[in-house]
Image: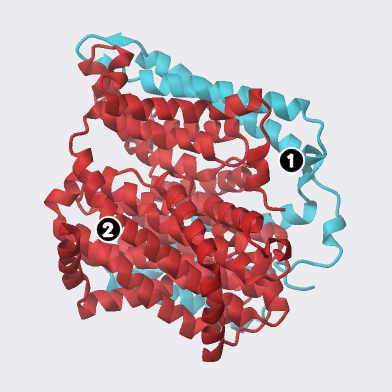
Amino acid sequence: MTDITEPQPGESDEPALVTLRTADVVVACLFLVVSAIVISDSVRLGFHWQDSVGPAPGYFPFYIAVVMAIASAYNLGRAILARGPEEQEGMTTKTGVLRMSAIFLPAVLYVFATSYIGIYVASAIYIAAFMIFFGKFAVWKALAVALSIAIVSFMMFEVWFLVPLPKGPLEAAFGY
Amino acid sequence: MEEIGSLLGGFAVAISPYNIALMVVGIVLGVVIGVLPGLGGANGVAILLPLTFGMDPTSAIIMLTSIYWGALFGGAITAVLFNIPGEPWSVATTFDGHPMAQKGKADEALVGAFTSSFVGAIFAVILITFLAPVIAKFALRFGPAEFFAVQFLTFASFLGMGRGSPMKTLASMCLGFALASVGLDGVTGTLRLTFGHDELMNGFKFLVAVIGLFGIGEILSSMEEGLAFRGAAAKLKMDAVIRTWKQLPAMAVTFLRSCIVGCWMGITPGGATPASFMGYGLAKRFSKRGRHFGKGELEGVVAPETAAHAAGTAAMLPMLTLGIPGSPTAAVLLGGLLIWGLQPGPLLFVEQKEFVWGLIASMYMGNVVGLIIVLTCVPLFAAILRVPFSIIAPAIVVVCAIGAYTVNNAMFDVWMMLVFGVLGYLFTKLGYPLPPLVLALVLGDQAESSFRQAMLTSQGDVTVFWHNWLSGGIMTLGVALALWPLVSMLFGKKDDDALANPA
């Protein structure tokens, strides 16, 4: 097994998992959903002229959302009707998604853990785990890198610049 | 020649040992940020912004702008040596820079890139020195209608001059405005679009959006494609500097052309990336050696680098004089000014003279210091890329998370950063431009309140924006630019593309 972050030979021939066209359709639909949410709240706030206030609070967001909806409808239509070779191009492959998940899913866990064990401990675990599991580093190297990054950031934020970051039980044990 | 006097005063402020030390630190950090994928000018400055809150504003902005200059220099290193653009604006540099490196002329390509960056930046700074006071004085007479007109023009120029699909630009921009309107409405105090969630009361922090969109988004793209740095070694001998500099005077026309294109694209929010492509495309078309472009021509490195750096620097002009940033990084700096209690705009030139001229003087200094640092330390910076990406990737995620948290000391922002990261990845892949979104998020509140104030004074009459020649002229230009894509679509004009896409 090699480092997951390095491209492997023959990878460019892999069939696409998602085409640009599919992704275009999905994103345009998401835009339409956002427009609908904004419009509904603007209607609640009122989007007409109010005496003494001028345009009501919902005025600006309402028209912005209408323009956004029109633009997205156009983008959606174009994506659906597109016949060009460009649109059939792949956006990403299975390997691509796997690699992205390798950094992103642990990042979600990392942010979740930060609330409980503090950002320094969580960062050290996150970096070390990524290096060991995906970078195929020796455990001692990974620990050395991760711990030094965590300690340097601790010194930098808590001691030198006095910017408090989330801390957990370990820092509390040291009196911070 | 009042400007010269003020500028000399500015140098007196900027040249203190402390400020020069900050400049050096900032440029070194900036180059590192520019070299690393996932950290760029905009999110790099956003992450480091909280660390400067304790400094006095002049020193803080000197350090932050130095980071920006450093990032502009740094992008070229990876582009030439590894064919990996460290920043979007150095994509065009790879076209000729990397072929030069393969021919064993990496040193000449790098010296050429750094020197032309320097020339572009100095050209733009001189422009700022003489134009900024004039614009600021002029803008003192602006009312809400004029301010809205200028803001409208800013956004219209994204539509009229952007590359790619104008409808996607429009959608991306509107999303920025919609996100900006979340939270407390500044005029009436009503809560908008919060749906009962207290976290949303203060709205979306654009610094968090910048860190997510550019930082996490970029890491996702880099992970997807996989990243291995196997490139030419960087050996820079002093004779390469002399050798390259001897070739440069022959390219004076290219320099001048790229400087002008760059300044134009920087002042209007076209930005450094399209400027670099345009500079390259124009040089390819008009240069005598244009046919050799793409095979390792020094002029093909000079053209985009000069334009990118001129644009990056010129983006500071509208930020300082009108409070309207010309690029996402300028937007982040504007956010910083607001936090230090300085209101960017015409009044800044009256009330904070020392600060403004100190900043402008530091732009000259920063670029000189930057040129010296990058010319002498290239091998060191290139060595950063020997660090495996499997260490760099998680470390950058950690840095981004810390940066997002420090914006407002809230875990909610860190979650938002992850969401913006996915959004940034998708948008980049699908050709939705990110700068309009960021600028709309920054300027949304201001644009909305100047619009509403203008409408209120006129009792709902839209013609208020045409009540005098000034705002009327700007509005008309804006409308023309906004409708330009529609016009060119109807008449089937294709010449834009030929210019913007150098094959």
Residue in the picture at 29% in, 12% down: B461
Vertical position of residue B235 compared to residue B448: above or below: below
Q: Is residue A66 left or right of residue B408?
A: right
Eye-nearest disc, 2 or 1: 2
How far across and how far down the image is residue B3, in percent?
19, 59
Residue in the picture at 40% in, 45% down: B206
Do the residues bearing badges 2 and 1 touch, measured as CB atoms within 8 Å? no
Q: Which residue is mark 1?
A: A20
List the single residue furthest toward the left.
B351
- The numbered dot on residue A95 is none
Q: Number of callouts in the render?
A: 2
Q: Quadrant of residue B487?
A: top right
> Type of residue at label 2?
Thr
Vertical position of residue B96 compared to residue A23: above or below: below
Identify the subunit bearing mark 1: A
Residue in the picture at 49% in, 77% down: A147
From the image, which quarter does the N terminus of chain B lie in? bottom left
Q: Which residue is mark 2?
A: B129
Q: Is residue B355 left or right of residue B418?
A: left
Q: Nearer the viewer, residue B36 or B400?
A: B36
How packed is label 2: few (under 14 Cα within 10 Å), some, or many (20 or more)?
Answer: some
Q: Are marks 2 and 1 on the same chain?
A: no
Identify the subunit bearing mark 2: B
Vertical position of residue A92 compared to residue A65: above or below: below
Q: Nearer the viewer, residue B414 or A96?
A: A96
Residue in the picture at 44% in, 68% down: B119
Q: Is residue B67 left or right of residue B132?
A: right
Spatial separation of the CA atoms under disc 2 and disc 1: 46 Å
Residue B434 can be seen, yes or no:
yes
Colour given to chain A in the rendered image: cyan
Q: Quadrant of residue B277?
A: bottom right
Q: Which chain is red?
A: B
